[in-house]
Amino acid sequence: VQLQASGGGEVPTGGSLRLSCSASGFTLDWFAVGWFRQAPGKEREGISCIRKNGDTLYADDVKGRFTISRDPAKNTVYLQMNSLKPEDTAVYYCAADRMQYSDYVRLQPLYYAYWGQGTLVTVSS
């Protein structure tokens, strides 16, 4: 079971990026998938997740700017990030889990068993 996050880079304030989370060794469509980020000196935080049935959830500070989606044919989950701000600068991680947790916990890193390596997003002011 392997996950790989990609698509990070440096963009100016207001720019956009699309992150990809691709899976090998398992069918990602059968898992809940979350996107997390960790800025220097801060704890890892959940920003978005998608259940097997397509139900999505967003953290308040990315709602309306970020969109999570699946492409089953490519075994990939995307995070489209628009209107980026300097405070979005962080290492972004994707994670997956077989369980479908409630909205109260499914943005918490503890509830995800499988993790990819991070991809760095830098938003310049």
Image (cartoon, rainbow, N blue to C red):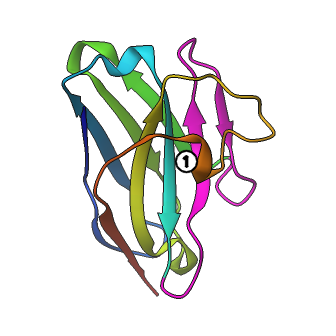
* 68 to 66, vertically: above or below: above
Badge 1: few (under 14), some or many (20 or more) residues near its Cα, within 10 Å?
many
Which residue is at the front of the view, 124 or 99?
99
Type of secondary structure dominating the magenta stretch: loop
Q: Residue at x 53, y 16 (%)?
A: 52
**Whole-percent x and y of residue 71?**
33, 20
| Residue occupying image coordinates x 59% and y 44% | 48
Secondary structure under badge 1?
strand
Horizontal side, residue 100 vs residue 94: left or right: right
Residue type indicated by callout 1: Phe
- 45 magenta-colored: yes
Compared to residue 78, the image places residue 31 above or below, namely above
Rendering coords of residue 61 (x, y %)? 70, 60
Which image quarter is the N terminus in?
top left
Where residue 62 sits: x, y (%)?
64, 55
Magenta-tinted stretch: 40-63
Answer above or below: position of 125 versus 113. below
Q: Is residue 120 found left or right of 67 in the rendered image? A: left
Q: Which residue is mark 1?
A: 66
Residue 4 part of the magenta-drawn span: no
Percent position (x, y) of residue 80? 43, 44
Is 122 displayed left or right of 61 in the figure?
Answer: left
